[in-house]
Image (cartoon, rainbow, N blue to C red):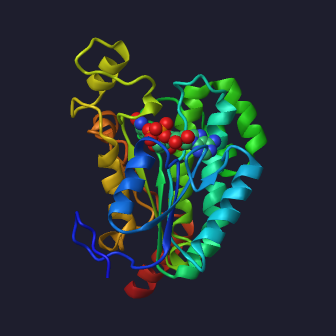
Amino acid sequence: MLTDPISRLPLHANGAIALTGAASGIGAATAARLNAAGHRVITVDLHDADVVCDLATEAGRRLAIEKVTELAGDALAGLVTCAGVDTSRNLPGSRVVSINYFGTVALLDGLRPALARRGDAAVVCVGSSSATVIPDLPVELLQLCLAGDESRAGELADATGSALAYGASKAAVALYVRHSAVKPEWIGAGIRMNAVAPGFIETPLLGKPRDASQSDPVLETFLEATPAGRLGKPDEVAALIAFLLGPEARFFCGSVVFADGGLDAKFRADHWLAVWNRPARLVHRQVGSLRRGAA
Ligand SMILES: NC(=O)c1ccc[n+]([C@@H]2O[C@H](COP(=O)([O-])OP(=O)(O)OC[C@H]3O[C@@H](n4cnc5c(N)ncnc54)[C@H](O)[C@@H]3O)[C@@H](O)[C@H]2O)c1
């Protein structure tokens, strides 16, 4: 049995883990961590990967699903969807949602059969704390994403701009995970699906390298917002991803775990607890049984 040199936990001795966005940042740190622990990692990216493809396109997604399934052999033990873009490269909003949401969901759906064949697979989607801390997210865009309408979502994302499109795309990933993870085709097929929501992490995604010793207004904004007073390291998110893939996380299902230096807790301390109103059907059933009990 293989042993993780860091946690000393037994790991799956067979089965590959597919990882998108593996060429840089959090994905590269995750690939390094999984490789060091003895896993076979199938990397997917625009460059420097086992499967080179553009997840913004239908053809790229199809290629990724076909090649990963082929390279995995019989079954896939894990999937990490980490490929993503933010707003620092002035991309149109449509490309942001196409990569971050539609590219992610296409791979989740396309690789689900290979994960199900394994019987005890794990999926980790990389979301973002921007899903909760960016104010006034366009709800209609979120809904179009969840409805699978890429063309109308793209039009709206272009109109709203890439910053709001980024937050909406990551909120949609988190909601997809929460809605789907509990369904028979996921947890019922032995596939645990969860998400991580990183805050500001020191990777090329944040734009030019940020040097804490020099004055940089963007860096100052990030640091001021983050209670921990620093940017996160890619390997700190990779460690969380590796944990969620591993056996110690086997009771996690549909969780969105923040690794954000306190951002979400600072901005949304009370908001995560939305009071849940019991559906009318349940209320009637319960009132009925109370009445019967009282009689
Ligand atoms: N860095 C942060 O502060 C931060 C914060 C929250 C969430 N995230 C998320 O973490 C994930 C990884 O980001 P990162 O910070 O490591 O950035 P990064 O830019 O270092 O890495 C992103 C990777 O995704 C790949 N990619 C981009 N578009 C692609 C496409 N169309 N097809 C295939 N691959 C594509 C890139 O080539 C790159 O290797 C992203 O989903 C990002 O949204 C990052």
Is 34 situated left or right of 151 in this image?
left
Q: Using the rendered view, name the quadrant where residue 292 is placed.
A: bottom left
Measured as percent of width and height from the top left, residue 123 is found at: 48, 64
Measured as percent of width and height from the top left, residue 205 is found at: 47, 32
Instruction: Give the total of numbered labels.
Output: 0
Residue 88 seen in the figure? yes
Check the picture and name the quadrant holding the N terminus: bottom left
Check the picture and name the quadrant holding the C terminus: bottom left
Who's the residue at 75% across and 32% down the image?
Answer: 155
Who's the residue at 45% across and 25% down the image?
Answer: 207
**Above/below status of 30 relative to 74:** above
Is 134 situated left or right of 53 in this image?
left
Residue 169 seen in the figure? no
Q: Nearer the viewer, residue 128 or 31?
A: 31
Who's the residue at 35% across and 34% down the image?
Answer: 202
Measured as percent of width and height from the top left, residue 34 is found at: 38, 61
Q: Nearer the viewer, residue 216 or 174?
A: 216
Q: Nearer the viewer, residue 216 or 196?
A: 216
Measured as percent of width and height from the top left, residue 223 is found at: 28, 25
**Above/below status of 200 relative to 21:** above
Is 206 situated left or right of 44 in this image?
left
**Above/below status of 22 relative to 7:** above
Is 1 situated left or right of 87 in this image?
left
Who's the residue at 42% across and 41% down the image?
Answer: 25
